[in-house]
Amino acid sequence: MAGSDTTENRLARFVYAALQAVSCPLVDGLYLQEADNMLHLLCTPSQHRTDIVAWICSRINPNFATSKGMSTRSKDPDVLIKEMAVLGQELMLCRAGDLDLIRGDTNPLRQLQFLEQLLTLIPKCSKSAGYRRDEELLLNELYAVENLPHLMQMLQPTCDPWPAHMKALCKGTKSSAKSSKNDADVGTLLEFTQSALEQAQSECEYLIDEPQSPIIFSPNSLRVAACDLQQLMATFSHVYETDLNAYCSRDSPSFSTETAVFQRVHRLLLACNTELEMLKEVSETSLFMSEGVNSLQTHPHHQGRGENHMFLNKSGRTHQVERFCHYDIPDDSNFKSSG
């Protein structure tokens, strides 16, 4: 029954400590120290375990211990187990049919979790059990395998127990006297170097006349400039390969030396102008004819050969007709043949 699972061991220690915290008479005088013994006590079916669960139920519900059927339960263990299962169902911790959980025939981890939940329902148990659990966790962490070297150093310190930053601070305090002496030596060296530089500058006459401008060289600035240049070159290469390469590698356009196209365009433009002038003259002739018709109604009549005649101004009308017939409409066939 005793497993090596750390969770089960810690939970068994917690449940056993909680039983001691609530002064359970069934664990007094046991003085269990090993987790295996605690697991055997709490997770193995026995009358002692059944009595522990019954005592917890009586602490949660006082009516459970003072009911009229207590004597009947003590004589029939199955009845007692069923009653505790019903109480667990009322507390929403298990089902009424989980008799194996009450008896101790199921998974040890589930049994321990069930007992832990029952103990938390006992008044004034959660606080004391939690305090004991904190102590147990602290001790378990202190005596853990990975912390044993630190524990041995605490018991038998053979080195400086200060942290790294405190060690550096202590070393800095101890070496303050030495550092002051080193500072004096460094100051003397700097003065000597400064005087040597001034002497060298005075000997270099070509540096005296020129304006001295401070030159600041920064590797970071150079690195940033190089990165920017690389990005720009990469961007230009991408644009050239995707967009500009097709235009740069294309042959130059060839211009035709023939003038036939321009001649055809010139003839068409002349024909268009002629037609526009004809339309203008047609409009003017139409207007003149309208005025002539209107004048016929108001012009005086004369007698000739026994009939009435009106005086007509033939000169004006003849002039308009001559102007209209003066235009020579170009033939479209000429343009088609020339094209």
Image (cartoon, grey):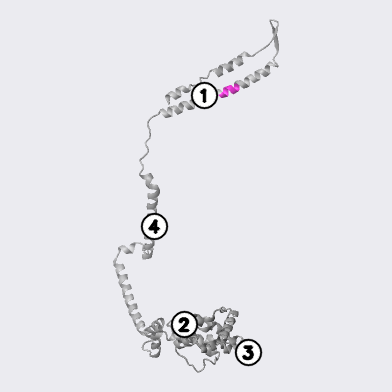
Q: Amino acid at mark 1?
A: Thr
Earlier along the polypeptide chain: callout 3 or callout 1?
3
* Residue 169 painted magenta: no
* Residue 281 painted magenta: yes
Observer-side mark, 2 or 3, equals: 3
- Element at badge 3? helix
Give the magenta part as a residue range.
279-284
Q: Which residue is mark 1?
A: 274
Observer-side mark, 3 or 4, equals: 3
Q: What separation in Å lies between label 2 and label 3 (alpha carbons)?
A: 34 Å
Earlier along the polypeptide chain: callout 2 or callout 3?
2
Q: Which residue is mark 4?
A: 231
Q: Is residue 338 above or below residue 74?
A: above
In the shown orientation, is residue 241 left or right of residue 309? Answer: left
Q: Amino acid at mark 3?
A: Thr
Earlier along the polypeptide chain: callout 4 or callout 2?
2
Looking at the rendering, in which quadrant would you find the C terminus? top left
Q: Which residue is mark 2?
A: 8
Observer-side mark, 4 or 1, equals: 4
Q: Nearer the viewer, residue 45 or 136?
A: 45
Q: What separation in Å lies between label 3 and label 4 (alpha carbons)?
A: 88 Å
In the shown orientation, is residue 31 left or right of residue 122? Answer: left
Observer-side mark, 4 or 2, equals: 2
**Residue 307 visible, this orientation:** yes
- Disc assigned to residue 66: 3
Mark 4 vs 2: CB contact within 8 A? no
- Element at badge 2? helix
Q: Amino acid at mark 2?
A: Glu
